[in-house]
Amino acid sequence: MDTELIDAYIAAFVARCEVMWRPGCLMVNEPGLYGLQSTAEDPPTRLLVTDDRACAALAALLQDVRGGTVSVFAEATRCTGIVASSGGWKPKPVTAMMSRELRTLPEAPLPAGLALRPVRRRDEDPENGVPLDDAVAVATAANPLGEDTANPLADYLKSLPPTTRLFAAVDDDGVVRATSGSGRFGEQASVIFVSTDPSWRRRGIGQAMTAAALSFGRSAGARQACLGASDEAIGIYQRLGFEIVAQTTQFYRAGPG
C-alpha cells in the first residue's frame, strides 16, 4: 500500500474532524484509530480505522458513542467485526479515494439543459438557493437504501460546518436532477452528497457535479481532497485525478431519537 497516500488521507480526515470539534468532544489519535468521539448527537462521532492495532481502543470508544460513522479499512478485519457486533451499525462498502493536487483538476461542464445552483441549507445561505429538502429528495431517490433516510440525511447536512457548500443541477423547469457538495478544512477539501437522477445518468453529470464541488474547495484554498466512492463512481473520480487509498466498510448509526 502507498503509505504516503494513506498518511495524506488520514491528515485530511483529521482536519475535517478538527473543524467539527465542540467542547465535550474528544479528538482521537491512537495507533490505527483517528477522528472525533462525541457523546452528543451534534456533532456526531466520526472515526477512521486503518488497521487492527485499534481493536482495544475502538471497542472502548464504541461503548459511549450515540451515533455517527465509523470507516474501517478492509485490512482491519478484527475491527470490522467489533463494529458489526456492537449493534445498530449499518455497513456500506465504500472506496476511500484521495486527490493530492487540486490545481490540476480538469474542467467538466454540465451538459446542455442543466444549470448549477447553490443549495440553501442554512439561514444565511442565498435566499434564491434550491431548498435543501428538494436536493435531499433527489439524493435519497438516486441512492435508495430501502428505508426513509431523507430526514437523517438532511439533519446531517445541516450539522456540517459553515465552510461546507452544497450544489444542485436544475433543468429548464427548475427541477433538481443532481447534487454535490464540498467542505474546506484548511488545505483539505471533502466531496459529499454526489447523486444523479437515474433518468439523467450516463451524460457526464456526476463528473461535472463533482468537479463543481472540487472547484469550490479549490477556490476556497484547498489543495487536496478526499472522499468515499461507491463502486459505480470510482471511474468518475479517477478521471478527476483521484487515487484509490483503500477499500473500506463505512458503518452508520443514527443517534437515539
Image (cartoon, helix red, strand yellow):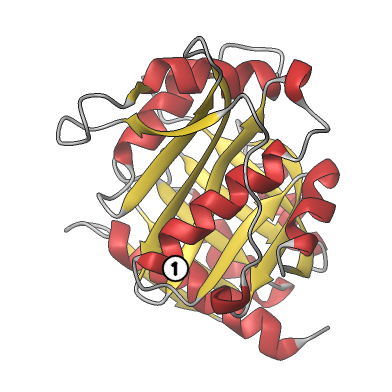
Q: Position of residue 215 (x, y in %)?
A: 49, 60
Q: Nearer the viewer, residue 206 or 111?
A: 111
For residue 128, what is the image quadrant? top left
**Regarding mark 1 in the picture, which secondary structure is present there?**
helix
List the single residue furthest toward the bottom: 4
Residue 73 seen in this snapshot = no
Total marks in image: 1
Disc 1 marks a residue whose amino acid type is Arg
Q: Position of residue 115 (x, y in %)?
A: 51, 31
In front: 227, or 247?
227
124 sits left or right of 115 in the view: left
Give the vertical position of 182 relative to 225 (above or below). Answer: above
Q: Nearer the viewer, residue 179 or 31?
A: 179
In the rendered image of this protein, does residue 118 appear above or below residue 16?
above
The quadrant in which the N terminus is found is bottom right
Identity of the residue drawn at 67% across and 80% down: 6
